[in-house]
Image: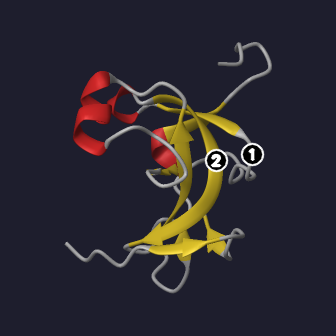
Amino acid sequence: MNNDLQRHETVPPYTRNLAATDQLKWSAEFEVPAIGADILISINSIGRAKVVGYATQDGYLGVMTVPYSPPAWWVRQNGPPGLGNLALAFGAEISPVTSKEKTP
């Protein structure tokens, strides 16, 4: 696996065309969440998280996040979440938080 992780402070140009080979790909039907937005990370039941930046890996655009209350296994494997210990999630792995959902 190519581990070409690159961090970004702003959203780089991207496409939703997952067949593209000349642009970064965003794998969700919704817009890339803004820094400061809350999202739900569905993969591995990570849960609610705050977007703090962006990253690209293997041609895909993702969001760098701080999970609010990740599962115990995540903390054992990665350590406590924080700005020094972020979780990268891609569009297909997340969903936006609706106004109906409670804040942590």
Is 20 on the left-hand or right-hand side of 103? left
Toward the viewer: 31 or 16? 31
How is the rendered protein coloured?
A: secondary structure
Residue at the farthest left position: 1
Amino acid found under the numbered disc labelled 1: Gly
Residue at x 71% of width, y 13% of height: 102
| Label 1 with label 2: CB-CB less than 8 Å | yes
Residue at x 73% of width, y 52% of height: 35
Residue 74: percent from left, percent from top: 30, 34
Amino acid found under the numbered disc labelled 2: Val
Say how many tags the image has. 2
- State which tag comes first along the sequence, 1 or 2: 1
Residue 26: percent from left, percent from top: 56, 60
Toward the viewer: 2 or 48? 48
Name the residue that disc number 1 marks. Answer: 36
Between the C-alphas of marks 1 and 2, the distance is: 5 Å
Helix, strand or loop status at disc 2? strand
Is 103 on the left-hand or right-hand side of 48? right
In the rendered image, which quarter contains the C terminus?
top right
Name the residue that disc number 2 marks. Answer: 51
Is 24 on the left-hand or right-hand side of 32? left
Residue 77: percent from left, percent from top: 23, 40
Residue 58: percent from left, percent from top: 37, 73
Determine whether 92 is above or below 68 in the image: below
Helix, strand or loop status at disc 1? loop
Asked where in the image residue 37 lies, by quadrant, the reply is top right
